[in-house]
Image (cartoon, rainbow, N blue to C red):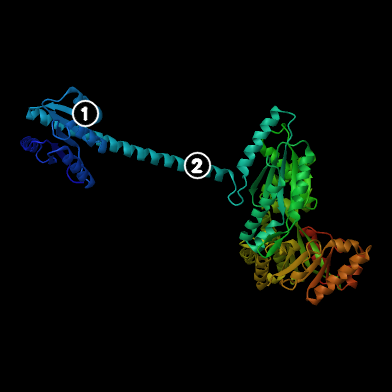
Amino acid sequence: MDKAVVICVDDEKTILNSLRDQLSRGFHDQFTIEIAESGDEALALIDELVEAGLEIPLVICDQIMPHMSGDKVLCEIHRRHPKTLNILLTGMASFDSVINTVNNANLYRYIPKPWDEADLALAVRTALRSYYQEEQMAQQYLELQAANQKLEQEIDERRKVEAQLTRLALHDPLTGLPNRKYFMERVDGVLHQAKVEASMLFAVMFIDLDRFKIINDSLGHDVGDQLLIAISSRLKQCVRSCDVVARLGGDEFTVLLHPILSLHDAIEISDRILETLSTPFRLGDHFFSVSASIGILEGSGQYTNSVQLLRDADTAMYNAKANGKARYSIFNHDMHSHTMHIWRLESALQGALERNEFYLEYQPIIAIATGQIQGMEALLRWRHPERGLIPPDDFIPIAEDSGLILLLGEWVLQEACQQLKDWQARLPSCADLTINVNIASKQIHEVQCVETIDRILATTGLEGRFLNLELTEGTLIEDTETTIYVMQQLRCRGINLNIDDFGKGYSSLSYLHRLPIKSLKLDRLFTEQVGSRVESRNIMQGIVALAHSLNLTVVIEGIETARQFQVAKDLNCELGQGYFLSPPLSVDQAEKLLLELPSEALRVA
């Protein structure tokens, strides 16, 4: 903006010139001086200057003028431009005129004529200082207002961010459901209330999807995520508005039912969830069938915290899985005892390998036609220093669930390969003997599976053709493409692959032609029933025919009687295994058998 303008108004040119000269001397071009000889001219001038963007801090006006007196001029200027200050000059003004100007014209000072030049200069200087102070204060006020508004916006944005962060901290980002932290806090709150109100009832449900990992691994995590979102939506529809559905992580969900009238309410909602999930989900062009195992815990003020409540609901859920899945199970304290037993076993497992509590036994695999020993199956045993011999069926599932099966499986493979290599080096009859080792699903899907087996073969010096790895049917349907790739890599190294317990669970008939396998080992259930059920013999006959059509060797396990052995022989099964032929043997017993029968057949031939 250009320099400020001070306007002088008087009907006498002499006075106007005098004012101009005095102001010029006293202020040395600090502002521009404009003059007007009447009130109308002054009003027109000031409007023009303001429209041009110039600042008018001060008007000096004579009171006695024709047509429009000074007080009226200043009142009009103030009406149009309220910030402009005014000085009134007069030699004979009435008191009323001065009062009118003070009240209505923003009059800064009244100066009588004739005026003293120094007095006028002081009045102008203080008027200008006052004007600019007001301007500065007004600007500062505007800046303060802007700063306050910006601060309010920042505070509002911060509150929104904090609210968002709080939501993220308490909700699952995928499904939008409350997360573990939120759920546990709500349960702790209800638990506290239950301690105060003994009659208040509530329940906690633990939901785990059955076989969800297969969908996730085979079709990808994107499809799995979409399915989880759809499942979350259905779960919310199954509960009441007062209940809380949360996602703990993965395919695990929890529900807090509060309040309830009785445990029957929780059972009804569980039935509703099972029925709702049984309806296939449609995602794009695919339909997915999903089931769930549900653990129900009736809440009680006797619990100390939410962790204990969730633990027992989790225990009930595992009981539902153990009893066939796709069902619910209600927690009782016997389940807790079973869980504690498992926990103690898992704790003992942690250091059992370092304490050398594991050892291997070897069960001969016999050629049914000749009775000769074709190979040995390495069987893991655990002798606990206090509990004695612990059955494999008790500790192997715990090792798989805890992940210890990776270290344990590697140890078994190392020991078995080393033992066979030792026999081959010392016993001529073992030159073509093979060793069978069970390999768990987690081992075959472990990233360094092939590398680990390569290292073991290299350190023991055993050729891959003497190693038979036994995989369960369940392993084949978990991430099938990855499993087949790993199996192909192992076959390239000469390692033989067998399907163990064939026919026990999921039918793998559709996979047989794709898998690089050498043999099928029929589940012992067929062998046990072959003498009493014609259907079992017919099924065995069909499986053996199918295996032979695919050039696969058939191994019959669980041969306990002469009759079972004869059936295996009649069906043209190549290999057999069971207590009738030989029980599992210690290293010394197995070596003794191999020494006694270097080329002879067992008595059953």
Q: Amino acid at mark 1?
A: Thr
Q: Amino acid at mark 2?
A: Glu
Near-viewer residue (148 or 298): 148
Near-viewer residue (266 or 187): 266
In this view, 483 is above or below 318 = below
Whichever of callouts 2 and 1 sits on the residue coming sooner in the sequence is: 1
At label 1, counting other C-alpha atoms closer than 10 Å, the crowd grade (few under 14, some 14-19, many 20 or more) is many
Location of the C terminus by quadrant is bottom right
Left or right: residue 250 versus residue 572 is left
Kindly identify the residue that appears in the image at 18 percent across and 40 percent down. 40
Kindly identify the residue that appears in the image at 11 percent across and 30 percent down. 120
Pair 2/1: label in front: 1
Per the image, label 1 sits on a secondary structure element best described as: helix
Tell me if residue 349 can be seen.
no
Near-viewer residue (248 or 518): 248
Q: Residue furthest top?
A: 95
Location of mark 2 (residue): 162
The percent coordinates of residue 259 (x first, y second) are 72, 36
Location of mark 1 (residue): 101
Per the image, label 2 sits on a secondary structure element best described as: helix
Kindly identify the residue that appears in the image at 32 percent across and 38 percent down. 142
The percent coordinates of residue 345 (x first, y second) are 73, 46
Near-viewer residue (334 or 277): 277
